[in-house]
Amino acid sequence: MSGFGKPTSLKAALKMALYGAAGSGKTLTALLLGEGLARQAGRRVAVLDTEQGTAFYSQAVPRRAIHPEEFDFDVLHTKSVTEALSALHKLDSAIYGVVIIDSISHLWDACRNAYSGKLTRQGGIPLHAWAAIKRPYRDLMNVLLSLPVHVILCGRQGIDYGEDEGTGELKALGYRLRAEGETGYEPDVLVRLESHKANRKAAAAILAHIEKDRTGILAGSTIEWPTFDKLAKPLLGLLGTKQAPVPSDDEVAMRDAEALERQEEERSHRSAELAADYAARIAAANTPEDLRHVGQQLTPGVKARFVPQDLERVRDLYGKRQAGLKAPPRAPTNSTS
């Protein structure tokens, strides 16, 4: 692997997450964004619909205030994370330029619901089981982040709880995307949608609160009636031409394990060579002074280069040689005729 270098753009597609309460405009906003992004890319929109939320948007509704004409997209209806993964692996990026997941909350629920082990006494999932539960979800996120197409995740709104510093009691701290806990960190843009009324008589407006924007263009802003032109188009100029793949946790773990194994093999080889060298020096020491000189060369830094078994062998050889050099000379034996 090469060292550090100048950064280059390795994102050719937007990865965006929208979440909000019921009626906050998640599906409509996602379809508006998807339509504009697909038009820019000259390709189609693929929607993975877990809740039949797109049913009316595939129809022309003249009385619909926003986008009365039908949206043009292809859909897969499923709540299964394995079916979702299979479809995304087969996705043809020459045909589709946008993928909408509506909703990611249901796919996270599917991972949890697939757990078939014993629950804890409190009815919860035991701690040791979470790694297996999260694996298909992490695979799903890796695929979505690696695809060279724009991705829009829609999620339900949850409450973020924490401990009050003053009372120590649990209290609501704010809102969060209801999915696996790390999901909000994955996309480049995280948006909380809200249906807002300025007063009782006013019609509700959709507000988009930009909670995260890695480009910095929209960060911290609130956009009324978010559309492609307002929410996505300003960011497109920062995209590159290549979408870097995101390795899975298992792939990274395997690479690290292989690299660490190679390092350990190399260290063992160097340790064996060093042990052989010091064994020869110890054997060549003919006086206690010669042996002490060899011992002085075994500094803490040198000892750190040995693996434990080689260091123990060198110490054993040193002790035996030391005992041999200190032993009194044997008295000559008188031969008898």
Image (tube, rainbow, N blue to C red):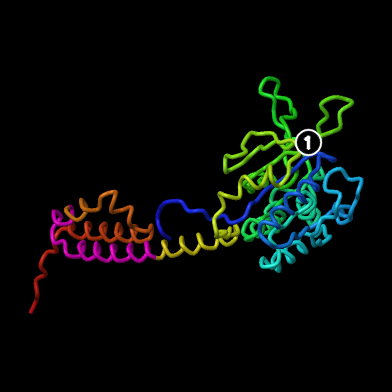
Q: Residues within 10 Å of mark 1 (few under 14, many from 20)?
A: many
Residue at (69%, 45%) from the top-left corner? 229
- Residue that carries the numbered disc 1 in the rendered image: 194
Q: Is residue 135 left or right of residue 258?
A: right
Task: Determine whether 205 is above or below 215 in the image.
Answer: above
The image shows residue 157 at horizontal and vertical percentages of 78, 40
The image shows residue 100 at horizontal and vertical percentages of 74, 55
The image shows residue 61 at horizontal and vertical percentages of 91, 50
Residue 269 image-quadrant placement: bottom left
Q: Is residue 159 left or right of residue 312?
A: right
Task: Determine whether 319 is above or below 159 in the image.
Answer: below
Amino acid type of the residue that numbered disc 1 sits on in the rendered structure:
Glu
Magenta residues, as a range? 266-292
Would you say residue 273 sits in the magenta stretch?
Answer: yes
Residue 110 image-quadrant placement: bottom right
Residue at (57%, 59%) from the top-left corner? 243
Quarter of the image with the C terminus is bottom left
The image shows residue 236 at horizontal and vertical percentages of 61, 50
| Of residues 324 and 241, the one drawn nearer to the viewer in this rendering | 241
For the image, the number of numbered tags is 1
Quarter of the image with the N terminus is bottom left
Residue at (73%, 41%) from the top-left corner? 226
Mark 1 lies on a secondary structure that is strand
Task: Determine whether 87 is above or below 224 in the image.
Answer: below
